[in-house]
Image (cartoon, rainbow, N blue to C red):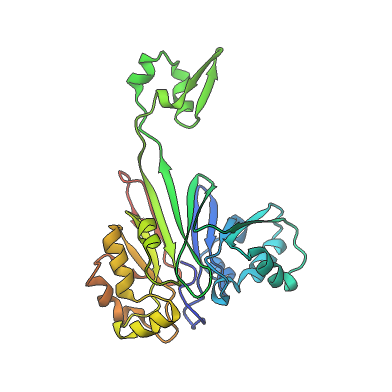
């Protein structure tokens, strides 16, 4: 979590941004003011970003982009960078680039126009889903699938040479001595993968519940901790801690991180009990918090 603040930054809280890494590739969700500083503080290189997904175009979710792009260029980046977000992304970024007009790398754009769209990136299956805010806004579900277990008896029965076994665990097909062998010949059924679902700036909606189903890590906005702020949440189309917890409980998520706190709430943990009464595995994320997710039969470490 690079930034957990909503609307305006506080002295210990940058604006909204989240970094997800897999096999050395980086996906950034939102880029609020202070994102590039938060990346530096976390010891992460701006060069290790390959995709930036924007939930929507309010300033606290995109105002850090020009500075981040300039830093990438000054660090010598030449590889293209892909940006994904709601319709209007190209126009919005073009406006922000008035102060970052020359970059030594290409920007590629994916404008999301449907209520649900699917992207593939670095082995991740990414689903963008429309939510309910004051302007077009999307949440993102990132899923890392896991292949089935290698079954040596099946490989032997199929007469597959021993030197091909290892390759078939990584490749869909392998040619050897004029014969072609396929991955499905040696692998069992797919195993449970990993899922991270991220969603801010919305009222509770069925699309969120669907995307949150069995998530290993569910990250939802907690704009207001006090249930007495329900009227304000309805007016501004944001969520309460307790509403986020209800989604996590119903979706049977493994863990819930709250984020995107109102600046009027300097210490979100004062209201954490409101969420934990509904979903005990709720945590108030802080800038710099990180979590390493591993497949089900592997160790899971939290920092």
Which residue is drawn at the image coordinates 36% and 84% (left, top)?
231
From the viewer's side, name the closer residue of 23 and 172: 172
Vertical order, 41 against 21 (above or below): below
Residue that sits furthest to the front in the current view: 114
From the viewer's side, name the closer residue of 167 and 138: 138
Which residue is drawn at the image coordinates 30% and 43% (left, top)?
297
Which residue is drawn at the image coordinates 54% and 69% (left, top)?
56
Q: Is residue 273 visible?
A: yes
Residue 73: percent from the left, percent from the top?
71, 62
Q: In which quarter of the image is residue 101?
A: bottom right
Is 260 on the left or on the right of 154, as rendered? right
Residue that sits furthest to the right in the current view: 102
Residue 158: percent from the left, percent from the top?
39, 15
Vertical order, 252 against 203 (above or below): above
Q: In which quarter of the image is residue 48?
A: bottom right
Q: Quadrant of residue 285?
A: bottom left
From the viewer's side, name the closer residue of 173 and 110: 110
């Amino acid at each position: 979590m690079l930034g957990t603040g909503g609307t305006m930054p506080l002295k210990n809280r940058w604006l909204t941004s989240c970094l997800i890494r897999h096999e050395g590739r980086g996906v950034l969700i939102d880029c609020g003011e202070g994102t590039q500083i938060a990346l530096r503080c976390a010891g992460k290189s701006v060069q290790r970003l390959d995709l930036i997904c924007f939930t929507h175009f309010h300033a606290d979710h995109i105002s850090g982009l020009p500075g981040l792009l300039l830093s990438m260029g000054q660090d010598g980046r030449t590889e293209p960078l892909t940006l994904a977000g709601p319709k209007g992304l190209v126009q919005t970024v073009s406006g922000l680039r008035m102060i970052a007009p020359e970059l030594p790398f290409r920007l590629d754009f994916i404008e999301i126009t449907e209520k649900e769209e699917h992207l593939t990136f670095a082995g991740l299956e990414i689903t963008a889903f429309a939510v309910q805010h004051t302007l077009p806004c999307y949440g993102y579900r990132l899923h890392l699938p896991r292949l089935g277990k290698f079954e040596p008896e099946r490989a032997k029965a199929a007469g597959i040479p021993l030197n091909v076994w290892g390759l078939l665990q990584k490749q869909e097909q392998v040619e050897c001595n004029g014969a072609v062998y396929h991955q499905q010949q040696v692998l069992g059924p797919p195993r449970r993968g990993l899922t991270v679902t991220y969603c801010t700036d919305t009222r509770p909606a069925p699309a969120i519940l669907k995307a949150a189903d069995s998530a290993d890590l569910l990250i939802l906005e907690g704009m207001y901790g006090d249930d007495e702020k329900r009227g304000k949440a309805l007016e501004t189309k944001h969520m309460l801690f307790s509403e986020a917890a209800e989604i996590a409980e119903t979706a049977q998520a493994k863990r819930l991180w709250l984020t995107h706190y109102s600046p009027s709430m300097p210490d979100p943990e004062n209201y954490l009990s409101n969420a934990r009464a509904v979903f005990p595995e709720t945590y108030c994320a802080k800038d710099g918090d990180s979590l390493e997710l591993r497949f089900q039969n592997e160790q899971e470490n939290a920092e």
